[in-house]
Structures are given as structure tokens and as C-alpha cells.
Image (cartoon, helix red, strand yellow):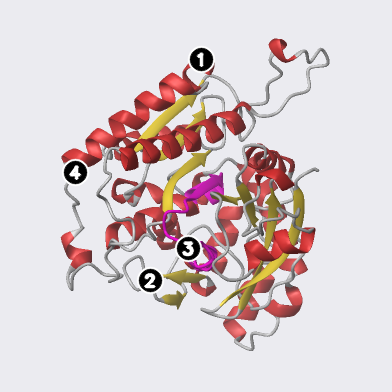
């Protein structure tokens, strides 16, 4: 049987927003359910309920975030999801606010800095895991990669990242956001998509009675570039504090303040789980920006940086001759590299468990904040020997077992 695809609406308690999560389950033989002694094949409904209700998820889950003006139905998202389900994992494509055909439920759309939605989705998904040994991985694309990196850095700084989150992959992450410095053509093109999203959500956006909000909305619809649009809408954007408890707020003083808050390079040194960052040298949208912040990535032993000679922005399509594909059609090399990285983490965690037979996985710190001054004490987190050793082992596992090195 082919993998099972379905959609579920997930509410966001912070402000009443609603997001669509597109799920894809592996084929019947790969999904784990509590079967009877008769081993009756579960129905499609039973398979879906095992993911959506209670503490029933027993497989690794990969949460995937899309780029600006996209949704979880785009080809690169579906290709990633199919790659993961082919390996027996559960894939979840997260649609941002107002994306994927789901209208806005509040007068606040998504932006490049607000991580509250990711935080809520991660919490709701991991609450369905049978135990905290079930791993969750995050994969971000373009703007989604920037948001994912910022989320991991915020949680790492506070020491509040859920223990189920075992690793992440960042594809085409600019690291620094400054729409005002973009060239006119790509800035104009991106802004067309932003204006389209505003028009689709006009019913909810017009619910705001504030005159300044309505003036900003009309001006943004007439803006030519995304930089101009950001400056206009920044005072009305949803945002969150970058320290625990990550309180939701509204508004920036300017576009420059928004861009500074959105730039994920400021948080990447605090990431506490393995992160693979892949960027193509011919990616005209993000490569130069990410290269300028390379030192921030290298300061953290958990971060592995991969630069490919080609691939464009979220491209990396290939058709290896050894697959017998004579027509040149193929999947993305990044799909395989991403899955190989996740597989390396899973094998590494299994190896560590085997070397620690007395370790009790149920013993963990239940306090979401490890100390009363955890935020300040993690401002410049110490790099422990154990972290360095794990990073070295992971790099060796990836270079030995994946195609990353052979494709550079």
C-alpha cells in the first residue's frame, strides 16, 4: 500500500490561530500499533488515530517547514515527505498561518521572526509520543529554515527544548534577514506573493478596527518591494520574546528592528542538538548572506555546514545514471542527504544507549527551567567534552554513511 496522506487542523492556543498539518504515514507494514495476537492489519482510520490521539506515536516523526509564499503541498515538500515515509518514519508538513488553503483565523499572518507557532506544533506533536525516547526531527526550507533555526536557538538558550527533539536540517537558510537590501527584481517578485496572501486573508485582516492598522494594510497592498512592505507592517506584526516563557507580543518599531529579530544567526550558537545546514554556492537568494555569518555557525560544534557547488535555491535535483533513469527525471539530492543525516543520528543514539546499559530513560529533569537564572546562565553556554565527542562521532557517521561528501 502507498503511504497515507491526510490533513488535520491544529489550533494555536496563544491567540486562536489555526494551522493545517499535512501528515504522511509510511506503508502499512512500517507503522507501529498495539496489535492483538491475531496481528490484524490496522484500518486506515486506526492508523490515522494512532497519530492524532493519545500517546500512540511510536515511530520517528519529521516536521517539515516550507518557504515564503509556499505551503506543504509544493513539490519539494512532498518529495521530502515521501523520502522520509519510505524510510519508515512519519512525516508532517506544517503550513504557516493563512497557507495551504486554510484562511486566517486571526488578523495576524506569519512572518520571519515569530516562532510561537512552531513551538506550539512541536509541543502538541511530542505530547502524542509513547515516551520521550521517540525522536522528533525538524527540517526547514528557506524562510522555514530561518524560523526553525531561531526556534532551536531560543529553546537552547533557555534550556527548554523538548527532549524528543533530536536534530534538525536547514536547507537554504539566509541566516540574516534584511529585505531592504534585496535587489529589486527578487524583492518585487516575493512581495507579489506577500500581497496575494494579504488579499486572501483580507476578511480577517479587516476585522481590526485600528485606523493605523487599516492604513498600513492598504499601504502594504500598494507596496512595490518586500522591504517596503516589511517597513509598513512591522508595527503590527505578531512576535514573541526570545527568552522563556517566550511571551507573545505585537509590533516592532521599524522594519530594521524586525529584520534584526528575525535573523537566525544571532541564535545559532545556542542550538543544543545536531544541525545540518546545506546551502548551494549558486543560490543567488541566500548564499552570500549565509556565508557572511559562517563564523556564528562554526562556533557551535553541533552545527555542520555543507556547501554544494550547485543546486540553486532549494534545487539539488539529480538523476543518477546508476538508477537506470534515462529521461533525466530524479528526486532532490538534498532529500537523501537529509534522510541520511537523520539516520546517522538515530544510529548514534542507539549506539550510545547500548554503551550505557544502566541509563534509565524515564529519569529526566521535569522542570522546564533548570534554574531560576537559566536564561542568564546560558548566555554564553559552555561546550562540554561530551558535546564535542558526540559532534565528532556524528560527523564521522555522516561522512562514512551518507552521500554528502561525494556530491560536493
**Is 123 part of what is drawn in magenta?**
yes
Quadrant the N terminus occupies: top right
Q: Residue at x 75, y 46 (%)?
A: 3
What residue span does the magenta drawing correspond to? 117-146
Q: CA distance from mark 1 to mark 4?
A: 30 Å
Q: Position of residue 120 (x, y in %)?
A: 51, 68
Which residue is identified by label 4? 383
Q: CA distance from mark 4 to mark 3?
A: 25 Å
Which residue is identified by label 2? 246
Does residue 211 appear left or right of residue 42 in this picture? left
Looking at this view, name the residue that lies furthest to the front. 37
- Mark positioned earlier in the residue sequence (3 or 2): 3
Q: CB under 8 Å between callouts 2 and 4? A: no
Residue 197 can be seen, yes or no = no
Which residue is identified by label 3? 115
Q: Residue at x 51, y 49 (%)?
A: 138
Residue 326 can be seen, yes or no = yes
* 74 in relation to 318, above or below: below
Q: Position of residue 297 (x, y in %)?
A: 33, 38
Which residue is identified by label 1? 406
Mark toward the viewer: 3 or 1:
1
Q: CB under 8 Å between callouts 1 and 4? A: no
Amino acid at each position: 500500500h502507498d503511504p497515507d496522506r491526510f490533513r488535520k487542523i491544529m489550533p494555536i492556543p496563544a491567540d486562536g490561530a489555526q494551522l493545517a498539518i499535512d501528515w504522511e504515514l509510511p506503508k502499512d507494514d512500517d507503522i507501529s500499533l498495539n496489535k492483538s495476537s491475531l496481528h490484524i492489519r490496522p484500518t486506515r482510520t486506526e492508523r490515522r488515530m494512532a497519530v492524532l490521539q493519545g500517546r500512540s506515536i511510536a515511530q520517528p516523526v519529521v516536521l517539515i517547514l516550507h518557504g515564503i509564499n509556499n505551503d506543504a503541498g509544493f513539490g519539494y515538500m512532498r518529495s521530502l515527505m515521501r523520502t522520509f515515509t519510505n524510510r519508515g518514519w512519519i512525516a508532517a508538513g506544517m503550513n504557516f498561518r493563512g497557507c495551504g488553503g486554510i484562511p486566517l483565523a486571526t488578523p495576524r499572518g506569519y512572518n520571519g521572526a515569530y516562532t510561537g507557532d512552531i513551538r506550539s506544533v512541536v509541543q502538541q506533536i511530542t505530547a502524542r509520543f509513547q515516551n520521550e525516547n521517540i525522536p522528533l526531527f525538524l527540517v526547514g526550507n528557506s524562510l522555514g529554515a530561518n524560523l526553525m533555526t531561531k526556534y532551536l536557538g531560543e529553546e537552547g538558550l533557555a534550556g527548554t527544548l523538548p527532549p524528543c527533539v533530536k536534530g534538525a536540517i536547514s536547507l537554504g537558510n539566509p541566516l540574516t534577514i534584511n529585505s531592504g537590501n534585496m535587489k529589486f527584481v527578487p524583492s518585487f517578485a516575493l512581495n507579489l506573493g506577500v500581497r496575494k496572501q494579504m488579499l486572501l486573508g483580507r476578511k480577517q485582516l479587516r476585522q481590526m478596527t485600528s485606523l493605523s492598522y487599516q492604513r498600513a494594510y492598504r499601504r502594504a497592498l500598494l507596496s512595490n518591494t518586500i522591504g517596503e512592505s516589511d517597513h509598513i507592517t512591522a508595527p503590527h506584526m505578531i512576535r514573541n520574546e526570545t527568552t522563556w516563557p517566550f511571551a507573545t507580543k505585537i509590533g516592532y518599531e521599524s522594519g530594521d528592528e524586525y529584520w534584526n529579530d528575525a535573523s537566525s544567526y544571532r541564535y545559532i550558537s545556542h542550538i543544543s542538538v545536531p544541525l545540518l545546514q546545506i546551502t548551494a554556492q549558486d543560490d543567488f537568494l541566500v548564499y552570500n548572506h549565509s556565508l557572511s555569518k559562517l563564523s556564528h555557525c562554526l562556533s557551535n560544534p553541533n552545527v555542520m555546514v555543507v556547501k554544494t557547488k550547485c543546486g540553486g535555491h532549494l534545487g539539488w535535483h539529480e538523476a543518477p545514471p546508476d538508477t537506470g533513469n534515462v529521461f533525466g527525471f530524479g528526486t532532490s539530492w538534498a532529500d537523501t542527504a537529509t534522510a541520511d543525516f537523520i539516520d546517522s543520528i538515530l544510529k548514534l543514539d542507539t549506539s550510545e544507549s547500548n554503551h550505557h546499559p544502566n541509563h534509565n530513560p524515564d529519569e529526566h529533569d521535569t522542570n522546564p527551567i533548570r534554574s531560576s537564572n537559566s536564561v542568564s546562565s546560558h548566555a554564553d553556554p559552555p561546550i562540554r567534552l561530551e558535546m564535542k565527542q558526540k559532534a565528532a562521532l556524528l560527523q564521522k557517521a555522516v561522512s562514512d554513511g551518507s552521500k554528502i561528501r561525494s556530491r560536493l
